Amino acid sequence: METGVTIPAEGMETRFKAVVDYFKSRREAAHIAGISEDMIYKYIGGRASLSLAPAAKLCAKVGVSLDWLVSGRDESGHVASNLAQVADGEGAYEAAFALVPKYDVEASAGGGREVTSEEEVGRFAFRRDWLSERGLRADRLALISARGDSMRPTINAGDTLLIDMGDAPVRDGIYVIRMGGELYVKRIQRLPGGLAKVRSDNQAYEAFEIPLNGSWVAGDGEDVGRDRIVGRVVWIGHVIDD
């Protein structure tokens, strides 16, 4: 039972901040911890002693131990290899992780989704070595949400999509495309003659074709309002329904 015992705060603020930064916002972290957002800021700033119960909830969600949060070491006494590697200072964190912006934008896995806002609503941390292994540049990445059922079972409504908006040649894969002011997420298959078939994984939706000429080149953002391939989907964050 929780008795109000607190964890000594000395040396912990940076590790606690690294845990909190795993969430899309301080508000979300506070909700999961069962405390106020103001207390999150006080813990990070070292202006309050961190209580056991909220610390345990956040660590469990992120996947690190309380031993690591308190001492920087796991149960075996070794320095933890997850967040510990980036919690020794802000510079080390930035060196290990890239923060990719998530926008208040939805791409339709269905009949199209009009873009009414491109406001940044949060950031997700991706390891720089993971991005590098896949040839991805953090400054060409963005996160958006999916809506609709046309790409089920690969993509579900509410999933988070990591989009590579680089200028690599279009190849077979899943892309976000803009048509008539609306965003779609579809599977693209290259065809002979400079064409591509655009299809859904849900066979209830009809396929269609688009030209793969200069005006459709992925990453060509000269006129962001025109019909074009926005970028390739390189990672999908699934929502698991209860």
Image (tube, rainbow, N blue to C red):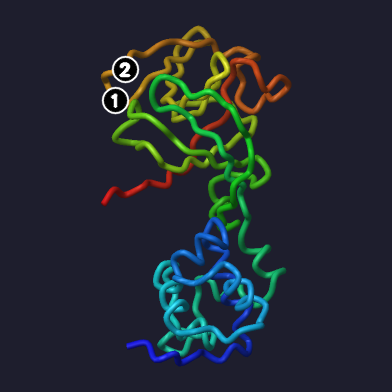
Mark 1 surroundings within 10 Å by alpha-carbon count, few (fewer than 14), some (14 through 19), many (20 or more): some
- Residue drawn at (41%, 42%) of the image: 159
Lateral position of residue 129 relative to residue 184, left or right: right
Residue 200 location, x and y as percent?
A: 35, 23
In the rendered structure, which amino acid carries the disc numbered 2? Answer: Tyr
Name the quadrant containing residue 126.
bottom right
Give the residue pinned by disc 2.
Answer: 205
The correct choice, above or below, for 163 with respect to 122 in the image is above
Closer to us: 164 or 182: 182
Residue 179, compared with residue 152, is above or below; it is above
Image mark count: 2
Q: Position of residue 41 (x, y in %)?
A: 63, 72
Quick check: 159 above or below 112? below
Side of 131 relative to 91 (left or right): left
Amino acid type assigned to the residue bearing label 1 in the image: Asn
Mark identifier at residue 25: none
Secondary structure under tag 2 reads loop
Labels 2 & 1 near each other (Cβ < 8 A): yes
Residue shown at the point (56%, 39%) measured from the top left: 104
Q: In terms of secondary structure, where does tag 1 sit?
A: loop
Residue 50 percent coordinates (x, y): 54, 83
Q: Which residue is mark 1?
A: 202
- The residue that appears at 42% across and 20% down in the rendered structure is 189
Instruction: Residue at 41%, 25% (x, y): give it.
Output: 187
Quadrant of the snapshot with the N terminus: bottom left
Give the CA separation, mark 2 to mark 1.
6 Å
